[in-house]
Image (cartoon, rainbow, N blue to C red):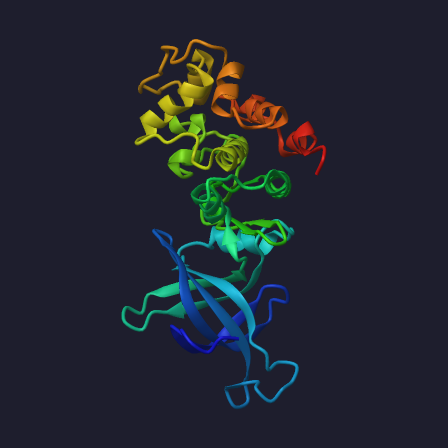
């Protein structure tokens, strides 16, 4: 384990082991910041058990002397009024294509005394955004067998989550961890995830803009887990194109970008999604060919099975988008 580049080292008295729910003191050694956003920060770190008798790390105990990790620690302000939805979901799920929670603990900032929740999760060497960028800069796309394997694993994770009624609500390449050497994939960042209950409204201003489904763009609040399927389609399209397929500069122009590929949204779409929507409906057709021909133009270097899968996923009406189970049996995966 490297000894250089340590940001901070500290000992916490109460670190919860997610698997056993037992609480033990541990030393945390943080190395580098690997992510930052409105949610908080993510750092890479290793942890070691501490002997509660003398409050020292178990350096002499052969069973416990090793540093564990590296892990990714996501640090967010602790929710004092209600339970952390992200922590609840991470404690519930257990799937090979979903990042696993190993430990968690609360830690107060010494300057403000504000309490932060620290989620200690498994770490993969890269994410899909970095992989897409790497291949784009090399003037290539991700190898086709890797695309299939990544798409299959991402869909498997969705099948599992949607079985609980859980929608991730922020599917995008940077939230998809990968190991390019083993072609392993895991969904991460459940900060926006929620168990969707039938006929219970949820906020529509969710998901990163480029990956936001049409019904969310027009303000639908009774949406389903099919918003994740739209995100899946956007991610698959991005692997083939090397860039986001829909790059609107505002929520409204995002709908225009979608209309450039799918044609004008049908009136029934607005009525079903949000009858009070008063924005631009983009009723003017922006291309002369059929939607299928338009897909073939945009994805001119993609195999027919891939284009067919995208045609089925990227549709306005969420009811017509395939379930994860239907996606998994698509011919796109036949040679996987």
Q: Nearer the viewer, residue 194 or 298?
A: 298
Residue in view at x 45 percent, y 20 percent: 261
Whether residue 173 appears in this view of the structure is: yes
User: 32 or 288, which is in the foreground?
Assistant: 288
Q: Residue 305 in the image: state x and y as whole percent.
A: 63, 26
- Residue name at image x 63 percent, y 34 percent: 324
| Residue 275, x across and y down, in percent | 39, 18
Question: Residue 336's spot in the image, x, y percent?
Answer: 70, 38
Residue furthest to the left in view is 111
Specify whether 272 is left or right of 326. left
Which picture quadrant has residue 312? Answer: top right
Q: Is residue 67 above or below residue 318?
A: below
- Residue 170 place in picture, x, y as percent: 46, 41
Up/down of 157 relative to 62, above or below: above
User: Total label count?
Assistant: 0
Question: Residue at image x 44%, y 30%?
Answer: 245
In the image, farthest residue toward the front? 139
Residue 330 in sight from this viewpoint: no
Say which quarter of the image contains residue 6. bottom left
| Corner quadrant of residue 271 | top left
Left or right: 212, with 326 as reference point: left
């Amino acid at each position: 384990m490297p000894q250089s580049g340590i940001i901070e080292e500290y000992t916490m008295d109460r670190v919860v082991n997610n698997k056993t729910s037992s609480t033990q003191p541990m030393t945390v050694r943080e190395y580098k910041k690997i992510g930052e956003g409105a949610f908080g920060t993510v750092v890479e770190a290793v942890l070691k058990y501490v002997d509660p008798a003398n409050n020292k790390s178990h350096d002499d105990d052969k069973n416990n002397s090793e540093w564990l990790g590296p892990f990714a620690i996501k640090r967010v302000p602790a929710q004092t009024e209600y339970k952390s939805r992200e922590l609840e979901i991470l404690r519930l799920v257990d799937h090979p294509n979903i990042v696993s929670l190993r430990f968690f603990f609360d830690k107060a900032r010494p300057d403000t005394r504000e309490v932060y929740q620290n989620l200690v999760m498994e770490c993969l060497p890269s994410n899909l955004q970095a992989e897409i960028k790497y291949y784009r800069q090399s003037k290539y796309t991700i190898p086709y067998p890797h695309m299939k394997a990544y798409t299959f694993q991402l869909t498997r994770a969705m099948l599992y989550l949607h079985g609980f009624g859980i929608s991730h609500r922020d599917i995008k390449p940077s939230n998809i961890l990968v190991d390019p050497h083993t072609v392993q994939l895991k969904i991460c960042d459940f900060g926006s995830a929620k168990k969707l209950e039938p006929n219970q409204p949820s906020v529509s201003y969710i998901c990163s803009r480029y990956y936001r489904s049409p019904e969310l763009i027009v303000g639908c609040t009774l949406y389903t887990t099919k918003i994740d399927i739209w995100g899946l389609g956007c991610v698959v399209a991005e692997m083939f194109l090397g860039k986001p397929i829909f790059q609107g500069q505002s929520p409204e122009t995002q709908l225009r970008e979608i209309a450039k590929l799918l044609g004008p949204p049908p009136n029934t779409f607005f009525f079903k999604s949000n009858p009070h929507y008063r924005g631009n409906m983009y009723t003017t057709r922006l291309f002369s060919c059929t939607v299928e021909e338009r897909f073939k133009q945009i994805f001119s270097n993609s195999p027919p099975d891939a284009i067919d899968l995208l045609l089925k996923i990227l549709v306005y009406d969420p009811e017509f988008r395939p379930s994860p189970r239907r996606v998994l049996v698509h011919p796109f995966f036949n040679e996987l």
